Image: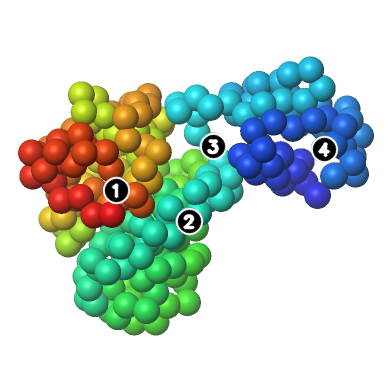
């Protein structure tokens, strides 16, 4: 097993258990405790964990960019619910943009029975997922590969996105706040998501319920930049009133 694969598995274990123990990981992966300590040191240097005596705990900081292989295993039930709701909104023949979020991958899986869709995405995972779908137009944005995210980003990505106009753009984010708008942990990802929304008639934020009242590092946009929020659970009454006052449809 490669070191990066082992570290991703350690992060998956941390997602479910919140802490890990060096001796247990050593037995689980059949490597020395020193190897595990080096893995945890690398994860700590990347800002993903905090080492503790004999192990490590997960870093809960909302500004941390978790690897895609870790993010896709978080709140799977919520993402499946969002994907079902989006599949009901997307019609045969639609032109859509999907960002490189793990939620968007679930949406891509849920709409594979649709006919004659045009999908523009910067997600390598979505391109692979849809590679065998017949009669669709699948467009890759091109751009720079963002390490660990399976995403294409950068000025070439944004230029390509800005050259199209689509029926809907579906993006996710790290946090949604009344004052700060919707935010993300990475500037390049945020710029790409912003460009997608600007290129779409219907501007959809697809987020699970944990993202409400959270703020991350960089702003993607304000509430006025959205036409719809799709989430897995009914938001607090406060949020329903805020979204309604802003003219934003809330689907849950």
Q: Residue at x 17, y 62 (%)?
A: 167
Badge 1 is on which residue?
Answer: 234
Badge 4 is on which residue?
Answer: 25
Tell me, yes or no, whether the two marked residues, 4 and 2, touch with CB atoms within 8 Å.
Answer: no
As measured in the structure, the alpha-carbon distance from the residue carrying label 2 to the one carrying label 1 is 15 Å
As measured in the structure, the alpha-carbon distance from the residue carrying label 3 to the one carrying label 4 is 20 Å
Counting from the top left corner in percent of width and height, residue 222 is at: 18, 33
Counting from the top left corner in percent of width and height, residue 241 is at: 14, 38
Nearer to us: label 2 or label 1: 1
Asked if 51 appears above or below 23 in the picture, the reply is: above
Nearer to us: label 3 or label 4: 4
Badge 3 is on which residue?
Answer: 66
Nearer to us: label 1 or label 4: 1
Compare marks 2 and 3 and give the one earlier in the sequence: 3
Nearer to us: label 4 or label 2: 2
Query: In the structure shown, which secondary structural element does the residue marked by tag 1 occupy?
Result: loop
Counting from the top left corner in percent of width and height, residue 179 is at: 20, 24
Nearer to us: label 1 or label 3: 1
Query: In the structure shown, which secondary structural element does the residue marked by tag 4 occupy?
Result: helix
Give the colour scheme of this rendering: rainbow
């Amino acid at each position: 097993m490669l070191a990066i694969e082992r570290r991703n598995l350690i992060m998956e274990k941390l997602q479910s258990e919140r802490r890990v123990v060096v001796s247990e990981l050593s037995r689980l992966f059949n490597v020395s405790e020193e190897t595990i300590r080096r893995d945890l040191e690398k994860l700590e240097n990347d800002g993903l964990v905090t080492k503790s005596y004999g192990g490590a705990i997960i870093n809960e900081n909302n500004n941390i960019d978790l690897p895609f292989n870790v993010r896709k295993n978080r709140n799977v039930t919520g993402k499946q619910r969002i994907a079902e709701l989006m599949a009901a909104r997307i019609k045969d023949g639609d032109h859509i943009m999907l960002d490189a979020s793990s939620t968007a991958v679930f949406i891509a899986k849920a709409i594979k029975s649709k006919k004659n869709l045009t999908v523009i995405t910067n997600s390598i995972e979505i391109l692979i997922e849809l590679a065998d779908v017949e009669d669709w137009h699948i467009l890759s944005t091109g751009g720079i590969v963002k390490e660990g995210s399976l995403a294409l980003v950068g000025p070439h990505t944004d230029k390509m996105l800005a050259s199209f106009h689509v029926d809907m753009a579906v993006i996710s984010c790290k946090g949604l706040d009344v004052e700060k708008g919707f935010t993300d942990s990475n500037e390049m990802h945020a710029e790409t998501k912003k460009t997608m929304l600007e290129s779409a008639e219907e501007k959809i934020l697809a987020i699970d319920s944990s993202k409400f009242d959270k703020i991350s590092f960089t702003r993607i946009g304000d509430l006025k930049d959205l036409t719809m929020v799709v989430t897995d659970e009914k938001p607090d009454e406060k949020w329903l009133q805020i979204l309604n006052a802003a003219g934003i449809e809330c689907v849950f």
